[in-house]
Image (cartoon, rainbow, N blue to C red):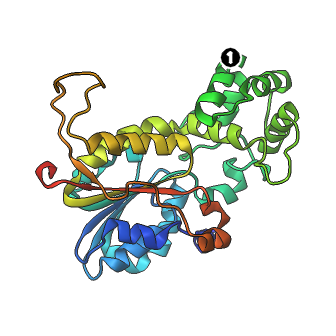
Amino acid sequence: MSTAVMTRQHVPVLLREVVEALAVRPGGRYVDCTLGAGGHAEAILEAASPDGELLGIDLDPEALAAARQRLAAYEERVTFVEGNFSQVGDLCRERGFAPVQGILFDLGLSSLQLEEESRGFSFQREGPLDMRFSPRQELTTAEIVNTYSEEDLADLLWRYGEERRSRPIARRLIEERPFRTTTQLAKAVEQAVGRRARGVIHPATRTFQALRIAVNQELLHLETALLQAHGLLGFGSRLVVISYHSLEDRIVKNFLRRESQDCVCPPGVPVCVCGHRATLRLVTRSIVRPSAAEVAANPRARSARLRVAERLPSAAV
């Protein structure tokens, strides 16, 4: 798929809400930790005109190529970085890009990755069992489904996919492997749990989510990334995160909640002994979801959940 086609197909989620949440201002410095095809970045750069800057990070070289094309008009104000957002602190400081006024994480898959059969992310298109965000990564979906034990597979599907039928699925995978394509794998999962009723998600949805998370170590990287991003924020700067499933959102919610409290001692401790002090203020007490109009126009936005926090003055870099 050409970068031109990829860019046209990319529809950024919660675009207006993201720009407002970041409180983008002219001359500000912003980090897009999941650059993708550059939809959010383009809106941020426009709002930060004429001299605002952006550093965009992505593991996927194809996504970076699409973003470069989309952001060509802002080229002098953009720094493109191929890397893992779990290293956002190091990546920014190495380039003298700190402190910053805002950081965005738009987690999960992009339309570009889902639409490209050769990447193996979608169970609706036949492709290889890959699911790597970067071709430099070694672990693939094929290695997991074809070599892991039944117990390890069941545990993975439960832990990363919250799949209640993880054991029968794992048993079926062991019986039918080796697997070579996404459609072959999806069919085996469907046979293990039965066909879906109308209006219910495809039986392979949670399995594919779990495998993708495992291949890319997404949850571990997210926890590390939030800590590093936290250290980049200057006074009054904003941290904005869009998540798409409960596992991601739980990590984000717990991190923001912890950093917005003065004491994080366990309940029942009579006197604070942790010494923790709040470094963030919650801008959104509850999640922000896409409007009905946005979901109608872009169904993939339906599960998006946005959270926002602001760095407190006493905690600024």
Relative to 175, residue 89 above or below? below
Give left or right: position of 36 versus 163.
left
**Quarter where residue 204 is shown:** top right
Residue 90 in view, yes or no: no
| Residue 113 x, y percent position in the rendering | 62, 56
Total residue callouts: 1
**Quarter where residue 41 is shown:** bottom left
Give left or right: position of 48 versus 15.
left
Bin the neighbour count of mark 1 within 10 Å (Cα to Cα): few under 14, some 14-19, many 20 and up. Answer: few
| Residue 268 x, y percent position in the rendering | 28, 22
| Residue 140 x, y percent position in the rendering | 63, 35
| Residue 117 x, y percent position in the rendering | 72, 54
Residue 63 in view, yes or no: yes
What residue sits 40% from the left and 55% below the top? 33
Please tell me whether mark 1 sits on a helix, a strand or a loop: helix
What residue sits 29% from the left and 81% below the top? 49
**Disc 1: which residue:** 151
Amino acid type, callout 1: Glu
What residue sits 82% from the left and 44% below the top? 183
What residue sits 74% from the left and 22% below the top? 167
Which residue in the rendered view is the most extreme toward the left? 314
Q: Quadrant of the N terminus?
A: bottom right
